[in-house]
Image (cartoon, grey):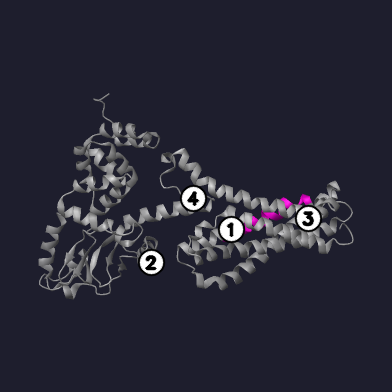
Amino acid sequence: MSGVRLTAEEVRDVWAILGPQERVAAFQQMERSEADDFFLGLSASEQATLLVALSNGERRLWLRLLAPDDAADVIQQVPEPQRHEFLDMLDEPTRREVSALMAYAEDAAGGLMSPRFARLRPEMSVNEAIRYLERQAQERLETLYYAYVLDRDQKLRGVVSFRDLFAALGAKPIGEVMHKNVVSVPETMDQEAVARVIAQHDLHAIPVVDEEGRMKGIVTVDDIVDVVEREATEDIQKLGGMEALDTPYMQTSMRAMVKKRAGWLSALFLGEMLTASAMSHYEDEIARAVVLALFVPLIISSGGNSGSQATTLIIRAMALGEVTVKDWWRIVRRELTAGVSLGIILAALGLVRILVWQALFHTYGEHYVKVAVTVAVSLVGVVTWGTIAGSMLPFAIRRLGFDPASASAPFVATLVDVSGLVIYFNVAHVLLRGSLL
C-alpha cells in the first residue's frame, strides 16, 4: 500500500468519513504538488488535527507553509499543552507575528488579520515604490491588490492601487498619488461587523488599525468568506433549536452531538408541558364542546408558524445590520399590520374550510357557524400575537446581551402555543356562551 499514490480528488471524496489515522495515511500517500493545495484548503481544525498526528519533522514543514494568520488559527485549535511546541517550530519573525495575533480575541478583526501587507512611505517616488513592492512581493505578502502608505510612526495615511502606480508619472511622490480617505476598522471590531464593512464598500481587503491609528494588518475578502460561512452555520443551527456545533457534523462525536441538542430539547419539552397545563385548565370547556378540541392543532400551529417566520426575518435583518434594537417600535408597527393581514387570510381559509366540511359531512353540529366564527377570530388574534412576539423576542434577547439567534423557531413556537390556547378558549368563551358553552 505504501507505493500507491492518491490524488487530491480521491482523498477529498472520502475525507469526511475517514478517522484521524486514516486521514494521516491518505494525506501521506498524496503527491507533494497536490498535497500543498489540499492542506491549504482544509479548515483550521482539520489542519490542526492532521498536524498533531504527524511527526515533528513533517509538522514543522507543513506549519511553515501557512501564513501567520492561518498559523495562529491552527495553533489555537491545538490542545493547550502543545501550543508552545508548535510555536517553537516557527522561525523567529513568524513566531512573533503569530504570538501577537493569538493575543487578540478569535472573533475580533485583530485575530482575523494578516500582519503581512504591502507598505509604502508617502515621500517615495512612484518608481521607488514599484521597485520596493517587487522586493516585498518575494516575502509572501497576503495580497497585492493595494499598498498602504504609512508615516514613520506606522500610522495609516493613505492607500494606493497598482493601477494608480503604473498610471502615475515615475517621479511623482506617493503622497500625491495615494487616496487619503481610507476605510479601516479598529482591531477590536467584531468579525461580523468587519464583514459588513467590506461588503458595504466592495473591498478586496481592509486595513486594521489600533487606537492611535497605527496600522496592524489587513483582513482580506477570503478571510471574510470563511467568517460569513461559519457565522451563518452557527445561526442556522441555533435557529433549529440547539447549540451550535464546534466541529463539522461528521467530525462531531456522538456524545458532543447529544450534549448540544439535549439541553434545548429538554427546555422545549418542559415548555410544551405548559401547553398541556393550559389544556387542562380549559378541560370543562372542551368537555362541553368537544368540537373545540378539533381545531387546537390548527390554532397553535398557525401562531407558531407566524412567530417563527417573524423571528427568522428579524434575526437575519439584525445579522445584516438592516435593523437595530432602537428600531423595535417601527418593527412592532410593521409586524402588527403584517400579523393582522396574515391572520385575516388564514381566518378566511379556516372559515371556508369549516363551512364546506359541514355542508359535505355535517361534522360540526348545529352551531357550526358560531364555531367557524370562533376559529376565524381566534386565528386573527393568534397569528397577530405570534407575529409580534416572534419579531420582538430577538430584540429582547439582544437587550439581555445574548445572541439573537438563540430565539430559535421551536422556542418561539413553544412560547406562542401556550398563549395561542389562551386566546382561542377565551374567544370561544365569549362567542359560544349560551350555545355550546
In the drawing, what numbered circle is on residue 282?
3
Foreground mark, 2 or 4, reads 4
Q: Which residue is mark 1?
A: 309
Q: Residues within 10 Å of mark 1 (few under 14, many from 20)?
A: some
Q: Residues within 10 Å of mark 3 (few under 14, many from 20)?
A: some
Q: Is label 1 in a helix, a strand or a loop?
A: helix
- Give the Cα distance between marks 1 and 3: 28 Å
Q: Which residue is mark 2?
A: 200
Using the image as rendered, state which of residue 419 and residue 143 is in the foreground: 419
Residue 180: percent from the left, percent from the top?
24, 75
Report the span colored magenta: 293-310
In the drawing, what numbered circle is on residue 243?
4
- Give the Cα distance between marks 3 and 2: 53 Å
- Inspect the magenta stretch and tell me whether residue 351 lies in it: no
Q: Is residue 396 left or right of residue 437?
A: left
Q: Is residue 385 left or right of residue 372?
A: left
| Chain-order first, disc 4 or disc 3 | 4
Q: What residue lies at 16% left-to-right and 56% top-to-bottom?
A: 137
| Chain-order first, disc 2 or disc 4 | 2
